[in-house]
Amino acid sequence: MKTQQIETFVVPVLPSKQVEDSTWKLDTMGYTIVKVTTDDGITGIGWTYDVGGAAIRSIIESYIAPIVSGRSPFETETIWQDCVSRLRGVGRKGLTFCALSIVDIALWDIKAKSVGLPLYRLLGGSESNIPIYGSGGWTSYDRNELVKEVTEIASIGYRRIKIKVGVEKGQRPQEDVERVRLVRKELGHDIDLMIDANNAWDPITAMRVAHGVENCGLYFFEEPVIADDLTGLASLRARTRVPIATGEHEYTKYGARDLIVNKAADVIQMDASKCGGITEWLKIAAIAQAWNLPVAPHAMHALHMHLVSAAPNGVTLEYLFMHEEANEQLFINPPVPAGGFLRIPDKPGLGLELNEVSVRKLDVK
């Protein structure tokens, strides 16, 4: 079996409502998708975010496809190394690794399909019902809208909920503290509460917020400072009782290693659709396990459900409600959480089928 065709699609999906976090207004929640087809007709898919999608497509078509074409999809390790060797001079993070990641994901999808197993089973996992948290609570909401959304999320069975902090681009940290306290009061203490600052603050401001919410019993405080500020993260982590989570904007096993050895995180959140694909994510999870740290990957629940199942230190998934429209348009019967859990479909591979009519129609050439 050899790879024969590699197609890439850039499919922006406009959200039905405009919301903001601490850094930007979410104007698109679509995907960049790759489809790999073998000479015996097996197809695999991989996907990442649509921001920078044109560049991702160009990298795949110009550099990665020539390396992958005509090779066995079972050669994921050597293909990964060959791609990195070719591209490391122009990108060891960012869009280059998004491109590599989704091709790698598609190859793993093919491998699992070719042996007739769901991916999590191929990777050694056994649990098919994975805990998942509801993610929303945008900074553009007023307090009433915030409370309304989190109580609705709780009412449909979620036992873990994450909200955004960094109101008005991080300029009102005391307002954030009061919003978090309000949400905790409304939810009570039977539901795990997480907050996500999306890189909003410097370490001093983040410290003030952390101290202001320490009595809220937070599950974690995500990306309190810019992802590259390892010393700032480490300083904050050493001075607060609130667990620090990060990794969404980090890449490769080396990035995970640096977070861990610098004592900058309690929870590792590397995203397989960006950090280097499944091949690299498995190594990241193993490194985190060696330090007895949990992994809770960022977004992309339909991909990460397999990886969390297979990782002994995988603890939870993120369900980003703003991706629902893209999932419904671009996939056929995508898995949907129920009662705070996501059940992995009993299908070979990722268990996810592209809606090719919709994808090809919406593709931005």
Image (spheres, rainbow, N blue to C red):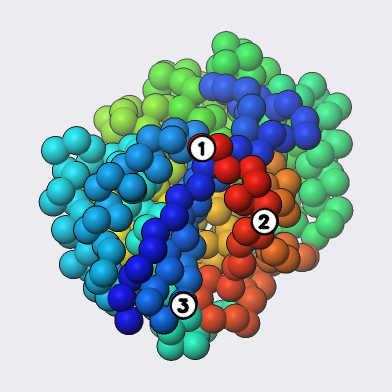
Foreground of the two, 71 or 282: 71
The residue tagged 2 is 357
Q: What secondary structure is marked by label 3?
A: loop
The residue tagged 1 is 365
Q: Amino acid at mark 2?
A: Val
Q: Residues within 10 Å of mark 3 (few under 14, many from 20)?
A: few
Relative to 229, residue 242 above or below: below
Q: How far across and how far down the image is residue 284, in percent?
A: 31, 59
Q: CA distance from mark 1 to mark 3?
A: 25 Å
Residue 41, which numbered label? 3
Residue 175, which numbered label? none
* Lateral position of residue 250 relative to residue 87, left or right: right
Kindly tell me whether residue 99 is visible in this rendering. Answer: yes
Q: Amino acid at mark 3?
A: Gly
Q: How far across and how far down the image is residue 325, in percent?
A: 73, 46
Relative to 66, residue 255 above or below: above
Q: How far across and how far down the image is residue 329, in percent?
A: 71, 51
Instruction: Write the residue at 64% across / 43% down.
Output: 362
Q: Amino acid at mark 1?
A: Lys
Instruction: Write the residue at 67% across / 56% down.
Output: 357
* Lateral position of residue 89 relative to residue 327, left or right: left
Q: Quadrant of the N terminus?
A: bottom left
Foreground of the two, 315 or 116: 116
* Lateral position of residue 88 relative to residue 232, left or right: left
Foreground of the two, 103 or 22: 103
Q: CA distance from mark 2 to mark 1?
A: 15 Å
